[in-house]
Image: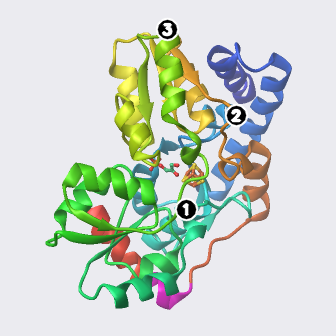
């Protein structure tokens, strides 16, 4: 079997029920082309758990949540890191492995949280609350990280806050994640008004409706959901921890309150379990990353991530402190 045929057979077994065969064939062709370019260019591909199903099942060397992929980016000895995720993730990879070429396959792959706050906003908060430590969610741009003491992701936010020797912490920019972490740690969190444009849309009513129709459903909510939604659900953690939870749990039906593609990715790996999801909600930024864009990224070396030197050093410190925890 050629490499394209092998990829096609794998895609058919995983996604044959949700994507037509003709489309899977085109995807397999693209994935085979990307594999060849990856070898030629000595590149590694990191894929976030929110990648569309055919991309997720084929080209990434490593898949994971923001924290796991940051660690992989720091460790790699390849010349090029292609980040199939959004800009703040690719920037974090550049901070952790600055001599490598880091490529983001789509120019516009942003994030509503990262765009909600500027470095100037952080400086103003520091002035208003002198001496209070600043934690920045990894979903921020490098200039905001550079003004922070330490970063965190959804996978380690409570641990990072607990590690600080202060009962009051400035926690930016996600208002909902801050409220969820405050509840978990018992600390006072001063926050910002940023929200994830995907997770803010889930409501307690969505949960009640599903529980009424399917009372045996296990409900998983990402911690970027409102504290009310998180309280009404059964489990709340990072994307990778949600994936492991479904894999290890014995229940037969789940509702995922997170980005919609991840439901396809979990369903493909757990064919015996039913995944309910509210599929009107797709992250428009993650959606920018396709197999076509990833092939072009490798072919034309686009779009390279640059972080100004003076910002790099300060931002790296905040990310490395988090990685050390
Ligand atoms: P994770 O770190 O849990 O993968 O979350 C990243 C993200 O952007 C969620 O919306
Ligand atoms: Fe940002 Fe929300 Fe998209 Fe995650 S899902 S990248 S937090 S906009």
| Residue that carries the numbered disc 1 in the rendered image | 113
| Residue 325, placed above or below residue 131 | above
For marks 2 and 1 on the same chain, the one whose residue lies earlier in the sequence: 1
Q: Quadrant for the N terminus, please.
A: top right
Disc 2 element: loop
The residue located at (44%, 82%) in the rendering is: 122
Q: Which of 57 and 194 is in front in this view?
A: 194
Q: Which of 26 and 90 is in front in this view?
A: 90
The residue located at (75%, 30%) in the rendering is: 28
| Residue that carries the numbered disc 3 in the rendered image | 272
Visible in this render: residue 52? yes
Disc 1 element: loop
Classify 10 Å Cα crowding around label 3: few (below 14), some (14-19), many (20 and above).
Answer: few
Q: Is mark 2 within 8 Å of ligand 2?
A: no
Q: Position of residue 126 (x, y in %)?
A: 35, 86
Q: Where is residue 50 in the image (x, y as percent from the top left)?
A: 58, 41
Magenta stretch, residue numbers = 308-312
Q: Quadrant for the C terminus, please.
A: bottom left
The quadrant in which residue 115 appears is: bottom right
Q: Do the residues labelled 2 and 1 touch (CB within 8 Å)?
A: no
Q: Do the residues labelled 3 and 1 touch (CB within 8 Å)?
A: no
Residue 162 located left or right of residue 207: left
Distance of label 3 from label 1 (alpha carbons): 35 Å
Q: Does the stretch in magenta take in 309?
A: yes
Visible in this render: residue 79? no
């Amino acid at each position: 079997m050629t490499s394209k045929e092998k990829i096609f057979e794998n895609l058919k077994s995983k996604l044959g029920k949700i994507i037509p065969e003709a489309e899977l064939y085109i995807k397999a062709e693209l994935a085979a082309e990307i594999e060849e370019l990856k070898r030629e260019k000595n590149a590694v591909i990191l894929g976030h758990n929110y990648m569309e199903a055919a991309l997720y099942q084929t080209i990434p060397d490593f898949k994971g949540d923001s924290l796991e992929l940051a660690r992989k980016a720091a460790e790699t000895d390849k010349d090029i890191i292609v980040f199939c995720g959004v800009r703040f993730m690719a920037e974090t990879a550049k901070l952790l492995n600055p001599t490598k070429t880091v490529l983001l396959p789509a120019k516009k792959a942003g994030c509503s949280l990262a765009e909600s706050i500027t470095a100037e906003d952080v400086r103003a908060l520091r002035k208003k609350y002198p001496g209070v430590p600043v934690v920045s969610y990894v979903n921020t741009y490098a200039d905001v990280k550079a003004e922070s003491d330490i970063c965190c992701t959804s996978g380690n936010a409570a641990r990072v806050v607990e590690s600080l020797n202060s009962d009051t912490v400035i926690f930016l920019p996600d208002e909902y994640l801050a409220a969820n972490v405050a509840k978990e740690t018992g600390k006072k969190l001063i926050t910002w008004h940023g929200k994830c444009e995907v997770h803010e849309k889930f409501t307690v009513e969505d949960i009640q409706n599903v529980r009424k129709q399917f009372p045996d459903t296990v409900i998983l909510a990402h911690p970027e959901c409102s504290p009310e939604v998180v309280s009404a659900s059964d489990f709340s953690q990072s994307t990778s921890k949600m994936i492991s939870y479904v894999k290890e749990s014995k229940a037969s039906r789940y509702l995922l309150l997170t980005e919609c593609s991840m439901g396809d990715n979990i369903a493909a790996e757990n064919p015996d379990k039913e995944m309910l999801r509210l599929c009107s909600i797709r992250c428009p930024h993650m959606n920018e990353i396709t197999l076509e864009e990833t092939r072009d990224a490798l072919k034309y070396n686009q779009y390279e991530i640059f972080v100004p030197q003076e910002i790099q050093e300060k931002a790296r410190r905040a990310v490395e402190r988090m990685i050390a925890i």
